[in-house]
Amino acid sequence: MLERASPSLLEACVATDAGSAQEPKSCRTASPVPAGPGHGETEERALSFHGFRYTCRITPQSAPRTLPVLILGGSEQDRHSWLRQERRLAPVATVITVDLPGYGDSDFLPVSFGIDFLSGTVRHLLEELRIPRVNLVGACFGGAVGLRFAQHCPDMLERLALIGMCLNIPPDYATSMRRWAELIERGETSPIAQELTERFMSPPGASRVRRHAAVSRLVYAGIAGQSPERKRKSAEHNARLMRHEWYRPGSTPDVPALVVTGEFDTLTTPAMGREVARRLPGARFLTVKETDHLAPVERPDDFADLLVRFCTDLPLDGLPYAHPAERFGVPMVHP
């Protein structure tokens, strides 16, 4: 059953500029996307999958140049984290972002439910919205969910873009998650926020990364300032990563695919991204210049341009903000 989201105001979303300026996020209000041909009013809808409530955000386009774009963000993002990308994508496609169960302000999801369940939620979302096929963008944890969805529901996929994705959780990160669980139990959030900031960001001064200091402050403040419920969800997310498969080998649909990392990403490195691209039929891989794991935040307009180009089949050659695309992938074996 599709229901309207609650009309209550939500807290301000993450800053999108280097300073402290923020864009307010609200429920069932006028779209922040600039007026233009085909733009509809952004709406939010609450849905339920196997008893777990979750919320999606939809900015419709009545005269699209490509199929709807569904963005699945990382574990520390929510459906309001992609406003800059939404603005650039909205003139060419309907844009959907979502807080899956266990994330954002959707219902708490016990650790027994893994990536298979979340990919099933994605299918449920599209069925409820009556969208048969999408361009799917998955960032970090959202990439793991998106890739599993691609394996389970190949007929619902038009294109696949994976951002900051890897095939395995690095062993040292897994070790840290066990320690973070103990810190969360003791209510010690600041050390976790500092460590996660250092994980997500490249070392200060080691390379030229756009807005490094501002984004570092943003990441730290966002994690350190989590509500008790968000902390509870973060702890369960870490446990979920430890208990369930991150990547499961298997066939993926033979659709256009793009794997992207920041050139200085130290969490999901370019080498890891290339390994992901090798598993996808005919995939391209590229790195975004002067960025690390948080490329969509460090170069939001350029990153949005990249998504628009990919989703509308525009050339990816000669982009001033990216290194040349590399061709990877394996031939698709048809039965």
Image (spheres, helix red, strand yellow):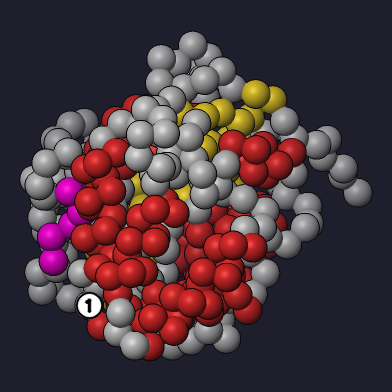
Residue 242 seen in this snapshot = yes
| 40 to 231, vertically: above or below | above
The percent coordinates of residue 299 (x first, y second) are 32, 32
Q: Amino acid at mark 1?
A: Ser
| 48 to 97, vertically: above or below | below
The residue at the point 28 percent across, 48 percent down is 216
Report the front residue among 171 and 324.
171
The percent coordinates of residue 113 (x first, y second) are 56, 81
Q: Is residue 110 left or right of residue 59?
A: right
| 58 to 175, vertically: above or below | above
Per the rendered image, the range of residues in magenta is 11-15
The N terminus lies in quadrant: bottom left
- As for residue 213 lying within the magenta part, the answer is no
Prevailing SS of the magenta stretch:
loop
Which residue in the protein does label 1 denote?
A: 227
Element marked by disc 1:
loop
| 251 to 239, vertically: above or below | above
**Image quadrant assignment for residue 5:** bottom left
